[in-house]
Image (cartoon, grey):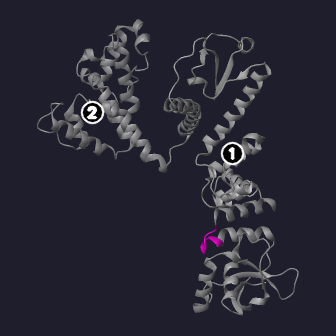
Amino acid sequence: MPVTVEELPLELIHPNEDNIRADVEEDESLERLAAEIGSFGVISPIIVYPSPDQDGVFIVQEGHRRRLASLRAGKTTIPCIVRSAPDRGALADVEVMLTTGRNHKPLTVAEEAHGFQRMLDLGLSESTIAKKFRQPRKTIRTKAKITQQPEQVQHAYAYGHLSLEDAAKIQELEEAGDTQVLERVLEKFDGTPFGPRNVDYTIRRAQQDIAEQETRDLLQSLGAEEAPTDVAWSVKFSEVRDALSESQHAALGHVFRILGEEVTWWEPKKKPAAALSEEEKEQKRRLQELKRELQISAETRRAELLDACRRPNTKMHVEADRQMLLDLVWFTIRRHPDKAFLAEATGVALPENTDEYHPDHGAWLDQVKEKISDWHWGQIVRLAVTAENWEHEKRLRKPEGFERDRYDGADRAAWLRTLRNGFGHVWDDAEAEAITRWEHASPDHLTTVGGTDLTVEVDR
């Protein structure tokens, strides 16, 4: 049937069973929309198609909120774009809702997730959905699976208290069958829409707790007893530092204390030491607990650092990456032997007093750093490499500067390679002759000072 625009009775417009909007009727913004429609009418027609089951009835494909708001505004009709029933049935409906629903009240992350899962249920592949909505396949999978997560996880994600990345980590626990860890992590949601502040830390803490319990069970099965919590500052025990097996410790009556990955053994003191004050005991207790917690913190940081090192460069991280690079190479740059070169490269004029201990020199360096903080990271690298190799560069003003059997011949050869490969410098006739001369002068020594990869093939 051709597409038409008609004013249809609201009583003939039925909601779509596959509507991905959540709690539409309880939406507070619906009252505002109803007031607007009461004053101005429906500006943008809703999209409907004939019901395949009831003659004269139409199903909403897009515009559920406008339909409900019109009913609340007391309207009896509503403008509709009438289309043919979709060939792909519910799949087409959900796709329209995911697409056109963004043009009115934006879909929530939970509604989007529900839509993706519905499309998967209807037989569409993750790859196809990813292409349609221009999102990575892994993202589609993670969002869809959120609808199958425990209610507290869904709520935390819907309210923005749980990132998609953290939701994926919780999903991975379930997929890996780590039910003990998963249960402990879910306990941290505590029946509220707020998830744990740091999911990585929470997961590792749960893993550590479980590992500690397994170690505790093992040691107790050997007959060893767990030490009291205050053993580290107790006047009654001293730490056993002898290299003994767990069985030997147990046989000698030593008691154990578990702090994360570390197991310590203790034995009663023959002569108790002076008792600690309550304040000293509390400090000792907190230090022991902090020692345990910092093991988890270190593992969390390690994972973050690994992710950061493997992560491709993105616009979101450019500023931070450039600042870290500048901080890393700033000492080299500020110690550039040729201050005039540094001034000319950055466009920051040299002060009258260039003594490095003079206040003017320090202020000039601050201006230089501020100037290059906006440079592309490649420019910062090139300036730092230039500063690092400036003494080699100065020596290349003389033929003997190309000599490669000197004590710093390998470093000199490395600078020559950087000039050629990094800066794209092309050897002129004089340089080509100097390089060739010194390569031929001591061929037996070249292997130890940088090899023969500078042999001129002639760069002309």
Callout 2 amino acid: Arg
Return the mark for residue 416. none
Q: Is residue 207 above or below residue 318?
A: above
Which structural element holds mark 1?
helix
Give percent across and percent down for residue 118: 77, 63
**Which of the two discs, 1 and 2, sits closer to the camera?**
1
The residue depicted at 70 percent of the width and 48 percent of the height is 187
In the foreground, 372 or 75: 75
Kindly identify the residue that appears in the image at 80 percent across and 70 percent down.
90
Q: Which residues are magenta?
A: 101-107
**Quarter that holds the N terminus:** bottom right
Image x and y of residue 453, in percent: 43, 20
Q: Which mark is residue 334?
A: 2
Q: Is residue 221 visible?
A: yes
Q: Earlier in the sequence, mark 1 or mark 2?
A: 1
**Left or right: residue 77 compared with residue 405:** right
What is the quadrant of residue 24 in the picture?
bottom right
Q: Are marks 1 and 2 in contact (CB under 8 Å)?
A: no
Q: Residues within 10 Å of mark 1 (few under 14, many from 20)?
A: many
Q: x, y (%) of residue 213? A: 73, 31
Alpha-carbon span between mark 1 and mark 2? 49 Å
Indicate the amino acid at tag 1. Answer: Val
Secondary-structure class at tag 2: helix
- Pick the residue in front: 181 or 2: 181
In the rendered structure, the answer to whether residue 304 lies left or right of residue 177 reads left
